[in-house]
Image (cartoon, grey):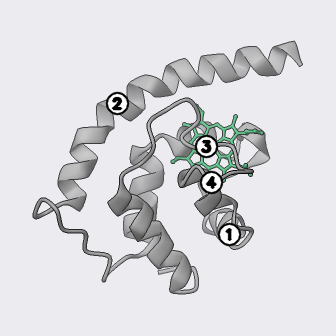
């Protein structure tokens, strides 16, 4: 139990830098025009991978040592968490879920809308 807590604290420190470091780059990519959010061409390989990478999700949820047992660096595992409702619950900070990114700032509304669109599309492996 103690070990787990220290590991978590360490991972959080590691990822704080990552999250803040990438936040601005990421928003530029997603907001070609400020105030607009285009979710018409959302893909797993492009959009989803970019968000999970840029927001530090993969750093804590890699297959080798996944926080909370949640793996987010493979299509099948992301699809599993999408279908269980955990992915949306965690990123929207819904009651009953642990808010993600863990210890970090909520991801942008456009990123949340993009993930929701991918789920609404039926979680395609595209
Ligand atoms: C600093 C490490 C860290 C980062 C960054 C992080 N997570 Fe997590 N995540 C955790 C830990 C630790 C847990 C287990 C929490 C628990 O058991 O309450 C977890 C749990 C989860 C869960 C299960 C939540 C639930 O209540 O069922 C999901 C889904 C998840 N993370 C998705 C994400 C996504 C998506 C991102 C990026 C936007 C992300 N995580 C970023 C550490 C992290």
C-alpha span from label 2 to label 1? 28 Å
Q: Any atom of ligand 1 within 8 Å of the CB at mark 2?
A: no
The residue singled out by tag 2 in the image is: 20
The residue lying toward the viewer, choosing from 101 and 48, is 101
Q: Is mark 4 within 8 Å of ligand 1?
A: no
Disc 3 versus disc 4: nearer the observer: 4
Q: Is residue 124 something one can see in this rendering?
A: no
Which label sits in the foreground, 1 or 4? 4
Answer left or right for 3 relative to 52: right
Q: Which residue is mark 4?
A: 94
Q: Upstream in the sequence, badge 1 or badge 4?
A: 1
Percent across and percent down for residue 19 are 40, 34
Q: Is residue 68 above or below residue 123?
A: above
Which is nearer the N-term, disc 3 or disc 2?
Answer: 2
Q: Residues within 10 Å of mark 2 (few under 14, many from 20)?
A: some
Q: Which residue is mark 1?
A: 76
Q: Earlier in the sequence, mark 2 or mark 1?
A: 2
Residue farthest along the right direction in this orientation? 1
In the displayed structure, 60 sits above or below 71; it is above
Residue at image mark 3? 99
Instruction: Classify the position of ligand 1 by quadrant: top left, top right, bottom left or bottom right.
Output: top right
- Separation of residues labelled 3 and 2 (CA atoms): 17 Å
**x%, y% of residue 58?**
55, 45
């Amino acid at each position: 139990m103690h070990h787990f807590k220290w590991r978590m604290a360490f991972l959080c420190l590691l990822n704080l830098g990552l999250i803040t470091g990438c936040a601005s780059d990421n928003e530029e990519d997603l907001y070609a025009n400020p105030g607009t959010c285009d979710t018409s061409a959302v893909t797993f390989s492009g959009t989803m991978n970019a968000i999970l990478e840029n927001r530090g999700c993969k750093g804590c949820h890699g297959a080798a040592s996944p926080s909370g047992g949640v793996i987010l660096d493979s299509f099948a595992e992301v699809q599993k968490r999408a279908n269980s409702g955990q992915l949306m619950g965690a990123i929207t900070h819904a009651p009953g879920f642990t808010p993600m990114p863990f210890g970090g700032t909520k991801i942008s509304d456009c990123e949340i809308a993009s993930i929701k669109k991918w789920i609404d599309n039926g979680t395609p492996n595209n």
